[in-house]
Image (cartoon, grey):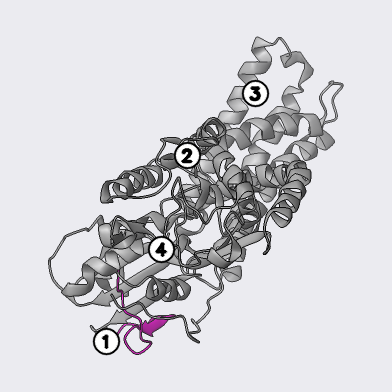
């Protein structure tokens, strides 16, 4: 096995448009709210009848229904720019449903007499007009902000040239020394650096490298495609077009932008108060470690994270400092003599994992996801990625403090190949069937398995 070193490799950086798109969706939501509010306030100003509900109250009632329906119908997503007509149709339909629901609910509650029919009759078409005009103007504004393109696209040429096609971003993989070697995690880290900031990546490569690029793209949390040079449809999930040429779509990010935002919000909402609440415990544990054995309080180690990139995981040190295994080649065992007295207690109770909350805060990890492994981790006498190349696909999402494999009891040393295969199957299932509700169930289940017979 030939594993390269990081050296002084510097990847070309591209500013991601994901955050820009998210901000634009938030601005559009605010614009929709303003349009609906302005419509009913204007209607009330034109006809100030002797009713209990004024224009502000009426607009709030309509907005409540509109936002609930619009968010459920995914009105705030890429179709705003890629298919403005469909986006307009969805938003207009959501408004109509909200108005109908308001009429029905006020009738059932015998509150219809509290609403001015004239305010409602004037405000409803005015809201629809303001909504449509505002969205049409916003599309032009948004595309200017995004410099005419909703996504960052990258063409990777790996041995097969693509003549006559203009690309904003294009690299020659072989000239940059980039090789999709699934047995070299450091090389995959480099490629992950290159892919960071891109939403769509198209690869032009020889047939013998299709499988490697397909596996790598599936673990990169991006839309990945291979240019069609023949009719080999292995691993293809769809057909596409890029620069006037046909492509094989081989990967899709497992989570949409809205789902990624929801997952990140959940992480922040739970992590910040947890760190504050546990700060006295963290201080006590740190003091216990210092009193028990010489060395630093924290143990830092390179782990494989999202897009197969390396990051520094932070844990409480549980082994004697001079015998800490930075490469992770030796899994801790039940009778491991490297573990300190305090360390054994921390491992048994999973308290050694708590500093990873700061990894979550920094964005390197999530509360729930596939557990990150050290580069030298072994399943029996094989490195993890040697057991199955699907190992690299599990890194399409951020690694987690806990995960589906852990709550199913797949913890402890990987003494044989089957130990990793069970964990890998659970991780891939998690990617395929992700939902916020499942994350919450895994977090709740984690409390039950924090003290586990395989935690040592």
| Labelled disc at residue 435 | 2
At numbered mark 4, what does the secondary structure look like: helix, strand or loop?
A: loop
Q: Residues within 10 Å of mark 4 (few under 14, many from 20)?
A: few
Q: Is residue 29 visible?
A: yes
Q: Which residue position holds label 3?
A: 102
- Measuring 40% from the left and 47% from the top, which residue is drawn there? 431
Foreground tag (1 vs 2): 2
| Magenta stretch bounds | 164-182
Disc 1: which residue: 163
- Neighbor class of circle 1 (other Cα within 10 Å; few <14, some 14-19, many 20+) is few
Q: Marks 3/1: CA distance?
A: 58 Å
Q: Between marks 4 and 3, how big is the CA–CA gap?
A: 63 Å
- Residue nearest the viewer, comparing 347 with 45: 347
User: Dot 3 surroundings within 10 Å: few (below 14), some, or many (20 or more)?
Assistant: some
Choose the circle earlier in sequence order: 1 or 4: 1
Dot 4 or dot 3: first in sequence order is 3
Q: Is residue 129 left or right of residue 325?
A: right
Percent position of residue 427, x then y: 38, 46
Rendered image quadrant of residue 217:
bottom left
Residues tagged 3 and 1 counted as in contact (Cβ below 8 A):
no
In the rendered image, which quarter is residue 2 located in? bottom left
Q: Is residue 239 visible?
A: no
Classify mark 2: residues with Cα within 10 Å, few (<14), some (14-19) or many (20+): some
* 82 left or right, relative to 451: left
């Amino acid at each position: 096995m030939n594993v390269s070193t990081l050296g002084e490799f510097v990847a070309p950086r591209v500013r991601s448009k994901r955050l820009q798109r998210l901000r634009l969706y938030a601005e559009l939501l605010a614009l929709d709210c303003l349009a609906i509010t302005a419509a009913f306030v204007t209607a009330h100003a034109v006809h100030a009848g002797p009713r209990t509900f004024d224009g502000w109250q009426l607009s709030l009632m309509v907005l409540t229904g509109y936002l609930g329906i619009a968010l459920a119908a995914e009105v705030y997503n890429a179709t705003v720019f890629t298919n403005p007509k469909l986006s307009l149709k969805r938003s207009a339909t959501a408004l109509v449903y909200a108005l109908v629901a308001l009429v029905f609910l006020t009738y059932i509650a015998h509150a219809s007499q509290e609403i001015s029919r004239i305010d409602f009759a004037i405000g409803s078409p005015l809201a629809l007009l303001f909504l449509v005009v505002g969205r049409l103007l916003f599309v032009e504004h948004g595309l200017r902000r995004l410099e005419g393109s909703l996504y960052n696209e990258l063409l990777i040429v790996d041995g097969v040239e693509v003549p006559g096609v203009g690309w904003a971003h294009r690299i020659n993989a072989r000239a940059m020394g980039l090789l999709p070697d699934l047995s070299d995690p450091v090389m995959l880290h480099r490629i992950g650096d290159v892919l960071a900031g891109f939403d769509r990546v198209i690869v032009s490569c020889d047939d013998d490298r299709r499988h490697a690029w397909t596996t790598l793209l599936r673990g990169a949390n991006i839309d990945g495609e291979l240019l069609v040079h023949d009719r080999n449809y292995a691993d293809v999930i769809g057909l596409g077009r890029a620069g006037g040429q046909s492509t094989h779509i081989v990967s899709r990010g497992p989570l949409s932008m809205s789902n990624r935002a929801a997952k990140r919000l959940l992480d922040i909402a739970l992590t910040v108060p947890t760190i504050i609440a546990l700060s006295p415990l963290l201080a006590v544990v740190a003091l216990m470690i210092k009193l028990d054995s010489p060395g630093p309080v924290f143990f830092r180690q390179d782990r494989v994270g999202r897009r197969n990139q390396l990051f520094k995981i932070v844990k409480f040190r549980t082994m004697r400092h001079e015998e800490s295994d930075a490469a992770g080649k030796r899994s801790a065992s039940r009778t491991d003599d490297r573990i300190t007295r305090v360390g054994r207690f921390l491992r048994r109770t999973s308290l050694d994992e708590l500093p990873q909350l700061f990894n979550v805060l920094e964005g390197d990890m999530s509360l729930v996801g596939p557990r990150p492994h050290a580069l030298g981790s072994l399943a029996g006498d094989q490195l993890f990625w040697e057991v199955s190349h699907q190992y690299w696909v599990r890194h399409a999402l951020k690694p987690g403090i806990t995960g589906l494999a852990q709550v199913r009891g797949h913890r402890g040393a990987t003494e044989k190949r089957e130990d990793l295969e069970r964990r890998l199957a659970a991780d891939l299932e998690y990617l395929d069937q992700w939902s916020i509700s499942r994350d919450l169930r895994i977090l709740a289940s984690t409390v039950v398995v924090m003290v586990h017979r395989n935690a040592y």
